[in-house]
Image: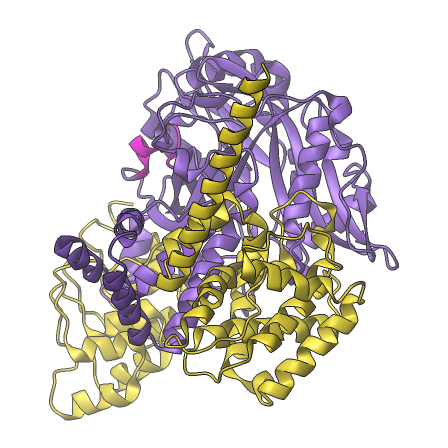
Chain colours: A yellow, B purple
Amino acid sequence: MFDWQQYAQSILFGLLFSFLLAKLFSIIFSFRDQNLRIIRANSDDEELQENKESGVDVSMDYSGSDEKQPLIVRQKDNEVIDSDDDDDDEEDSDDDWEGVESTELDEAFSAATAFVAATAADRSSQKVSSDLQLQLYGLYKIATEGPCTVPQPSALKMTARAKWNAWQKLGAMPPEEAMQKYIEIITELYPTWAAGSSSKKRGENANERSSNDSRPMGPVFSSFIHEEESDELKLDAIHAFAREGDNENLIKCVEAGIPVDIKDSEGRTPLHWAVDRGHIETTELLLSRNADVNLKDNEGQTPLHYAAVCERESIAELLVKKNAATDIKDDDGNYPFDLSDSKWPWIQPQAPSLDR
Amino acid sequence: MVQTHKTRLDFPLGLFSAAGRRLTLCCTPINSKPQTQVRLTMSEKGSVNNDTKDQNTSDLEIVNSDLTVDELSREVQDTLSVSQRHKFWETQPVGQFKDLRDASLSEGPIEPPTPISEVKQEPYNLPNLYEWVTCDLSSADTCAEVYNLLSNNYVEDDENMFRFNYSKEFLQWALHPPGYYKTWHIGVRVKSSKKLVAFITGIPARMRVRSEIVSMAEVNFLCVHKKLRSKRLAPVMIKEVTRRVHLENIWQAAYTAGVVLPTPITSCQYWHRSLNPKKLIDVGFSRLGPRMTMSRTLKLYKLPDSPVTPGFRKMELRDVPAVTRLLRAYLLQFVVAPDFDELDVEHWILPKEEVVDSYVVESPEDHEITDFCSFYTLPSSILGHPTHSILKAAYSYYNVATKTPLVQLMNDALIAAKQKDFDVFNALDVMHNETFLKELKYGPGDGKLHYYLYNYRLKQILRPSELGLVLL
């Protein structure tokens, strides 16, 4: 019985030891290679805590010494979490709303951490000693999570241990003080950080996010997709100018000798277009250039029909004043009067029609 | 080995690196093919790394030297927005993107109900300056406050030209269905000024999912005052309404969103039918193409003066049993649909002035009710327009045709809406709507509406035509 126990115990110890040894090697190798995959595996199985830590370490060259590589790699995968630590909502905890009432200090602090995260990505930025990095790390943890309460990591994980020490030794420093110190250190290192582009970008990003926030769920306001119809319509520049009410170019066309009553492929004159879009001055201009007020399009409609359909009262009045005929029927047999909902009496056809 | 290396370089470096971050975070990217490929490559890379360290190192250097700081920070931000958008929902019992292809997961509740005594009894914490309140919509004052909050802060279009303007009567109708819970109408006030700054609601509904009847909450009207948007109140509002729903022993919910969250049961498209094209063009709701004339547009959308179906008339109280029978039979063919009884129909379908309009077709011979159609009134404020301030929109609700062709019935609905001076008739492509949209000259909208279930998993994403539900 006793033998069996001893046997089991030694196997257990053996397994444990070899596991730790293997772990140590894998960590060392992964650090050497900046191997993101291994780092991730790491954080998955044993360093979830670590993963939530912020990447406060200020960046160094990627060509820097091997020992420093792990910090960078880790920082890269923390970066993403880091910048939104302040509005973290992934846990069910009630402190979601901490920091919601953000003070100026809060804002300066989160700007500073954002700056650090951005700088960390910039391999051309100046080197920062690892002591300072650890100090920043500790301050960050105090500012965001308060005093260190997590258990001490194993001595084999040197980086984790160093970070833990940096956090732990700050004791019960108030978060405000930590933020203040953090900002001071950053300001000392990068006197112009607050004016840097990274903080501006951060601001833009915050705006985008707030617009996202504005409708996380609920209904949607939709309007028409603007579709370009692939109509076979052919129109000349003069039609387009009339459509847009571009009188200046319209005059140029007319003066260049383009016939004022030229028709597009649907038989519309510039006057049709001007009336359709409701440009009264263009209408006047065309009429003053002797545009024919009674020309029909391919459906038999005159500009007055257009004015009636589109309920353009003052233009219709103008056309009538310029001798537009009220008694022309379109191909469907409608007088302009028939097409208008408003039934203006002054476009009622004069001659009593037989088919009405 | 060479093969692997080549694959790696084939990916755009930017995407590669961003995806790496996403991967390290274990957050789920939107399910698009390219990203899936990247994920595969990453794991491939991981396995290779263990024995080819040198190659890997050089690879990383390529990535780094090719990226400028700007690109990098842009990627970080892209990644940020993706992860932030879904971070909240990934902690919730909702279908996750990564589960989509997992055939082993069964349909039904994702988490079992917990005893009500284990539900958190006190409200979630709000920041000190704010407090939870229950909004009694039957009080005219409270209703006006809610109306003001929503009409100034609720959903707008992308260009901020329009904002939903749900009427007070509409809100009371939408929030007081049979068996509603007052406690589910939740507001947030500023403690000192008592100003209402946020709102969210749930209403109870019996939903049928395939053959199962599930008690659900329909969550809607989540609105946070524009000035408080950066404070990320929405997640705690959602959690609080969820808590209060749980307290009533209800564990599922239905909701919609314009954005893709984990994970839609179906994604619908809005369609619009111009009733007053000139006004729609004037206010920018639709545009007149350069090759289209106003004259022809107006002709295109012209409608007869009155409905054409014999026996088409406004629904009355006495029609409730017949309409309920029609509706229940009709909704059975959809995978997800509400389970309406007569009380529900009386509340939801019976016409209410300026809120919901319903018409039945009563056979002139035997006075049988053979068809009905309905639409609700949801106006929008037109922002910053000199002459128009309100866009009056009708939204297709529930329509059942057993004798009249659906196209004809819905054309009569358009005519009825036009008579009531609506500017536009909107419809989603849910139920059988697709069969009449194009023929009745609806045009596609720029709005997508995604439907979601909370704590209920469906095996496949549905087609819009398999959904029999309209949320207001």
Residue pushed farthest top?
A: B366
Q: Residue at x 51, y 39 (%)?
A: B256
Write the start and end of the magenta stretch as one range: B428-437
Instruction: Give percent across and percent down for residue A172.
Output: 81, 63
Q: Number of callouts in the render?
A: 0
Instruction: Give percent across and percent down for residue B296.
Output: 27, 56
Residue B23 falls inside the magenta stretch? no
Give above or below for B370 relative to B197. Answer: above
B37 or A283: which is nearer to us? B37
Q: Residue at x 30, y 83 (%)?
A: A246
Residue pushed farthest right?
A: B192
On screen, residue A139 versus residue B445, left or right, reads right
**Where is residue A268, by image quadrant?**
bottom left
Q: Residue at x 42, y 28 (%)?
A: B467
Q: Residue at x 21, y 49 (%)?
A: A332
Residue pushed farthest front?
A: A3
On screen, residue B219 versus residue B323, left or right, reads right
The quarter of the rendered structure image containing the C terminus of chain A is top left
- Is residue B227 shown to the viewer in this render? no
Give above or below for A296 relative to A184. Answer: above
